[in-house]
Image: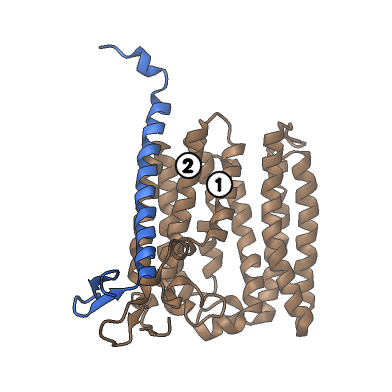
Amino acid sequence: MTEDKDMTTDEDGAAPVTLTPEQQARLRRRNIAVALGLIAMVGLFFAMTLVRLGGNVADRTY
Amino acid sequence: MSDITYTQNGGSNGASVSASPRGLKGATPGYMEADIADYFALLKPRVMSLVIFTGLVGMMIAPGDIHPLTAFTALLCIAVGAGASGALNMWWDADIDAVMDRTVNRPIPKGVVSAQSAAAFGATLSAASVFVMAALVGYVPAALLAFTILFYVVVYTMWLKRATSQNIVIGGLAGALPPAIGWAAVTGGLALEPLVLVAIIFMWTPPHFWALALVRNDDYTRAGVPMLPVVAGPDATRNQILLYSLLLVPLGAMPLVLGFGGVVYAVASIGLGAGFLTLAVNVWRYRTGALAHKSAMRLFGFSIFYLFALFASLLIERMAGLAPFAPFV
């Protein structure tokens, strides 16, 4: 069934590669893992900024 | 995957074992099979766990306070940096891994992750771990982490491993540094205490690896890796194991002398040291047959427990708030 298969190209861009549903699922899982990793890093920077600023936020002068 | 072929022209020539379709039009490359677990395996999780643990101990024995989130970030960076080094090691050594029984099922020789993907994965995580450490923890721990990664990948993996039988002796420095990184994350500098812990791991590495190399001698010979048993023979290796063990055990007592190891550490270092020496003597005594094999595997297994328990005793003392023994200070 071509409808549920992803068509992409080989490394050299020559031969088309057909992904099975299982391969598509694994690719999706890998992509989600990368996205979650990036979100976690953003969250870590945000939390560490709060930790580093601490009470100094309240003491700032405008 | 049965339709995977390998081109093994790697190692010092540029490690390019790659999984590729066997000339079949429309065939699926093996690396499309890679799941999250395969990428996690590239990080050498068992090695990573010991590195995290020794880094944590370095952090715990350091004077001063560190915010729990900063400590978590530092340990995360140490873990990711160590894992990234492992991935880069697997990329470079894929040709060796493919011919060794112990490593043939790693993701690259298995054909589920391409060498290029592993290299990109390792390089990205290496850069990210150093950057995050520098931005959120400090420049000194970040510099030490960068040095550790570069030393492991460039000095050990790319140079020493295939060049000299002293590969794991010198290369062992990379695996020994995490306590110093942990200490630097708290204090922003270095001192004698973390360097003693680094020296303990440095001295522990040769008998640990050579015990395994004695058993896996055929593997290393087939792969052409000049491990000490391959180059100098099993008997010379047994002498070296005993020599390093004799140096390691008194070095393990140094935290007592310097006053940052207490009663728990005293009991642990003496008991564990006696056990380590006994097993090293057995390796030296039994040179043939099943007993020789058994002795080497026993020392290898115990060496992991030795390091873990020795560092755990320091951790327990700090967590329990026990005063250091400090008999000579």
Q: Nearer the viewer, residue B193 or B11?
A: B11
Q: In the image, residue B45 lies at what x, y percent?
A: 53, 59
Q: Earlier in the sequence, mark 1 or mark 2?
A: 1
- Which chain does blue denote in the image? A
Q: In the image, residue B151 lies at what x, y percent?
A: 44, 59
Residue located 39% across and 69% down the image = A22
Spatial separation of the CA atoms under disc 1 and disc 2:
9 Å
Q: Which residue is mark 1?
A: B55
- Name the quarter where the N terminus of chain B is drawn: bottom left
Residue located 80% across and 53% down the image = B271
Give the side of residue B206 with respect to residue A27, left or right: right
Q: Nearer the viewer, residue B250 or B218?
A: B218
- Name the quarter where the C terminus of chain B is drawn: top right
Q: Nearer the viewer, residue B55 or B173?
A: B55
Q: In the image, residue B89 lies at what x, y percent?
A: 44, 67
Report which quarter residue B323 is drawn in: top right
Q: Amino acid at mark 1?
A: Gly
Other residues around mark 2 within 10 Å, as few (<14) / some (14–19) / many (≥20): many
Q: In the image, residue B273 lies at what x, y percent?
A: 76, 56
Residue located 70% across and 40% down the image = B316
Do we see residue B241 in this rendering? Answer: yes
Do we see residue B187 in this rendering? Answer: no
The hue of chain B in the figure is brown
Q: Residue furthest bottom?
A: B23
| Number of numbered discs on residues | 2
Residue B275 is labelled as none
Residue B74 is labelled as 2
What chain does badge 2 belong to?
Answer: B
Other residues around mark 1 within 10 Å, as few (<14) / some (14–19) / many (≥20): many
What chain does badge 1 belong to?
Answer: B
Label 1 and label 2 in one chain: yes
Q: Is residue B287 above or below residue A25?
A: below
